[in-house]
Image (cartoon, grey):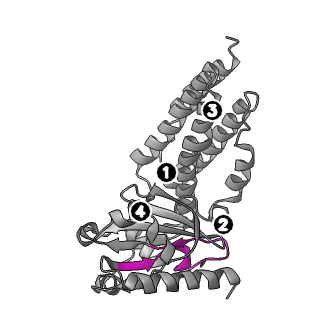
Amino acid sequence: MSDINEKFEQLIDRFTKWAEKQDDIRGAFIIGSRARKDIPGDEWSDLDLPIITSDPDRYINDTRWLHNIGKHYLTFLEKTPNDEGIERRVLFEGGLDVDFPITPLSVFNNHTLNDDDLLMLYRGFRILVDKDDRLAAIGENLPDKPRPNHPSPAEFDNCVNDFFYHAVLAVKKFKRGELFYAKSVCDSYMKRLLLSMISWHARAKHGLDYDVWHDSRFFERWANFEFVDGLGKAYATYSAEDFPRALRETISLFRLAAIKTAEILVYNYPDEGDKYSVGLIEEYLTRKY
């Protein structure tokens, strides 16, 4: 066991012993990389440790409880990835970073597992505290693993239209002199749409069971090399001179992924909208005023 893994296990042991004595904590478990069966956590992995409690305010609005687990240097609140809850993120001594999603007991009792929940649990979870045997029951009664679907023609068309609409928007902001905003659209919003298209292409090419993970995780492992390589040119430095180049590269990469996906799935590619949008973009970029 590496030194960092041993330190995490010591932290987990301290947390578990403390949590068992807290009446309001009804359950706690590990998800994510440190519970995962495939591609398990390494020295760079954090610890995802949801807490199920009848007193969520104690963990959201106060930080004194953290001293029972270890010395910490940073802590803040953030929405959970699904935007449905709150998690406290903590940097403990030794560089141990821990996410504590805080789940009210009432919410947990009434929550129905969705496909994202099931995929997370199928990758692995480790129960630490289970005072009411709720977590054990979930683990013993997991339904069949959900199978992903290809995007529908409407979803595919919506993604392409969304992308080119925002490409035009980015140029308008750029021409107004709002470089930060324009760059954010190109290098954040449009890149998320590009990621979706590349993941659709991967499953269209390799089959629905091909693992594209979530939220860009392990992108370099599952995405086609031409897309990974193309991203090296698709980000802009913070300069008015570089923005047009990066935008054009982003558009070319998205178009390549979208056309290849459409060919495999036998969908229509909205070529007219692409050409019109790119024509506007080039017109705006070449204006001298």
For label 3, the residue is: 180
On-image quarter of the N terminus:
bottom right
- Residue 46 part of the magenta-drawn span: yes
For label 1, the residue is: 266
| Lower sequence index among marks 4 and 1 | 4
Image quadrant in which you'd find residue 21: bottom left
What amino acid type is highlighted by mark number 2?
Answer: Arg
- Residue 214 part of the magenta-drawn span: no
SS of the residue under disc 2 = helix
CA gap between label 4 and label 3 equals 35 Å
Single out the mark in the foreground, 3 or 2. 3
Question: Is disc 2 in contact with disc 1, using a CB cutoff of under 8 Å?
Answer: no
CA gap between label 3 and label 2 equals 31 Å
Single out the mark in the foreground, 3 or 1. 3
What amino acid type is highlighted by mark number 3?
Answer: Phe
Find residue 260 and report its horizontal and vertical position in percent. 59, 50
| Lower sequence index among marks 2 and 1 | 2
Q: Which residues are magenta?
A: 27-49
For label 4, the residue is: 62
Q: Is residue 149 left or right of residue 143?
A: right
Single out the mark in the foreground, 2 or 4. 4
Q: Is residue 84 left or right of residue 211?
A: left
Question: Is disc 3 in contact with disc 1, using a CB cutoff of under 8 Å?
Answer: no
What amino acid type is highlighted by mark number 4?
Answer: Asp
